[in-house]
Image (spheres, grey):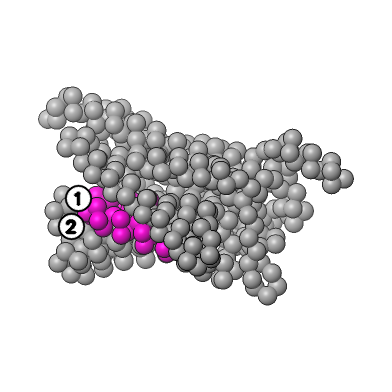
């Protein structure tokens, strides 16, 4: 029987971490609003809060049960409408574990909505929030974290580079393809225009809030305080984020001739996403390398998607998708024998483990990414056919979603003053 004081401390620690992860939604509000245009700021803030509400109710009703219910290897089938305050799960009271897992599901949904930004109807957000939280995120989470088949293979994903970030990014990819680019994003010759966000300070503050919240994300995934291993996880998290910011700034300077601030901010996030899978499996030097590579590839990925004419307003595909893939694969290279034995799976290629763990990681990336993309695409395609489109009209997009979807502006004084001058 676990010592009562340790049991209590574990539950307090995870509740604090759950709150940190939930507060990351504030970071996403500032990041997404700051990275887009003023005329959509109120809409972005409001829909984030509203869809987190939807996700919470749906996750309580069915999502948690599909992840952690009695398993057949593919999906869980119990613990629906969760309300058990007596069961102990992984050394935690069931309701504490539920709240922690709910916060992760809400983050995955918010990542997915990055691909909808500035052009999707509000009704599309509502319906997709329900279906994503019920049938997309829980399936991938069950496969890896809930006694599913990928977990059985030894898939390493400590805090969710695949489960949370890649899943959300693949849904965002489906949305960007079906919604098509924003008005004015691409010229007739295929070149891309920079539809700059309206507030770089908001974006930077959003990144900082996410950075701090990530300690709840990664360090909280230890689920206990007994050996203070969360400190080691936090160390790797900090190093990777710092290295990601540095790597992105250096490549932007080298390629563009300027130290581009948005690229640097996305580099920090890419470092965080990359280390999320591997934070409990690798040595600190590897965390620095993983974060640095994350910062470099996020810059290259952003350029690639522009050239492919895929409009990704807040770079969710690069930051959460490409960096999520790299982070997942990185344990197959850098997982140490001691940490692999402690946390599951096998050592990485560079520690004598051969290609086995790298192969498992690759299978996990392919299976999870393909599932999330195909199901998201089908859902959105059906919605597009039966709802007379999933995108607002051209006139509504030009006016901005603040006024067209909500009847008011996020910045009423600034926007209304500009309207009067224009008139």
How many numbered markers are drawn? 2
Q: Nearer the viewer, residue 405 or 26?
A: 26
Residue 409's image quarter?
top right
Task: Give residue 160's position: percent from left, percent from top.
Answer: 35, 51
Q: Is 296 left, or right, of 173 in this rendering?
A: left
Q: Main secondary structure of the magenta part?
A: helix
Residue 102's image quarter?
top left
Task: Give residue 87's position: percent from left, percent from top.
Answer: 25, 31
The residues colored magenta run 272-297
Taking the magenta stretch, the answer to whether it contains residue 290 is yes
Q: Secondary structure at mark 1?
A: helix
Taking the magenta stretch, the answer to whether it contains residue 158 is no
Q: CA distance from mark 1 to mark 2?
A: 10 Å
According to the picture, the residue beneath numbered tag 2 turns out to be 336
Task: Give residue 135's position: percent from left, percent from top.
Answer: 44, 51
Q: Nearer the viewer, residue 98 or 420?
A: 420
As drawn, 378 above or below 33: below
According to the picture, the residue beneath numbered tag 1 turns out to be 343
Q: On residue 240, which mark appears? A: none
């Amino acid at each position: 029987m676990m010592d009562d004081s340790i049991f209590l401390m574990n539950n307090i620690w995870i509740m604090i971490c759950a709150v940190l992860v939930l507060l990351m939604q504030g970071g996403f509000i500032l990041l997404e609003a700051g990275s887009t245009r003023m005329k959509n700021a109120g809409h972005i803030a409001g829909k984030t809060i509203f869809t987190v509400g939807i996700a919470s109710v749906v996750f309580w009703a069915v999502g948690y049960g599909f992840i952690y219910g009695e398993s057949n290897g593919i999906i869980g089938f119990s613990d629906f409408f969760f309300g058990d305050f007596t069961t102990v799960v992984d050394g935690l009271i069931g309701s504490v574990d539920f709240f922690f897992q709910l916060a992760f599901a809400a983050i995955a949904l918010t990542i997915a909505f990055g691909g909808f930004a500035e052009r999707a109807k509000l009704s599309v957000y509502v319906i997709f929030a329900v279906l994503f939280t019920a049938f997309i995120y829980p399936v991938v989470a069950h496969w890896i974290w809930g006694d599913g088949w990928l977990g059985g293979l030894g898939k390493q994903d400590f805090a969710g580079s695949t489960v949370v970030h890649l899943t959300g990014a693949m849904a965002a990819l489906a949305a960007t393809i079906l919604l098509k680019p924003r008005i004015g994003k691409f010229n007739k010759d295929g070149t891309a225009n920079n539809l700059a966000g309206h507030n770089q300070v908001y974006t930077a503050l959003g990144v900082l809030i996410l950075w701090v919240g990530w300690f709840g994300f990664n360090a909280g995934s230890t689920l206990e305080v007994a050996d203070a291993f969360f400190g080691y996880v936090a160390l790797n998290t900090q190093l990777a984020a710092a290295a990601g910011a540095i790597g992105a700034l250096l490549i932007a300077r080298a390629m563009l001739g300027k130290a581009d601030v948005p690229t640097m901010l996305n580099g920090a996030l890419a470092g965080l996403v990359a280390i999320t899978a591997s934070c409990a499996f690798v040595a600190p030097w590897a965390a620095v390398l993983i974060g640095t590579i994350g910062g470099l590839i996020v810059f290259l990925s952003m350029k690639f998607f522009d050239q492919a004419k895929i409009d990704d307003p807040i770079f969710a595909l690069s930051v959460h998708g490409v960096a999520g893939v790299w982070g997942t694969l990185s344990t197959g290279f850098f997982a140490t024998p001691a940490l692999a034995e402690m946390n599951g799976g096998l050592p990485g290629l560079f520690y004598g483990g051969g290609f086995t763990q790298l192969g498992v990681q690759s299978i996990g990336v392919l299976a999870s990414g393909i599932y999330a993309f195909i199901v998201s695409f089908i859902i959105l395609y059906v919605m597009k056919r039966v709802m007379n489109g999933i995108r607002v009209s051209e006139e509504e997009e030009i006016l901005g979603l603040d006024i067209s979807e909500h009847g008011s502006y996020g910045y009423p004084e600034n926007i209304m003053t500009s309207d009067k001058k224009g008139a």
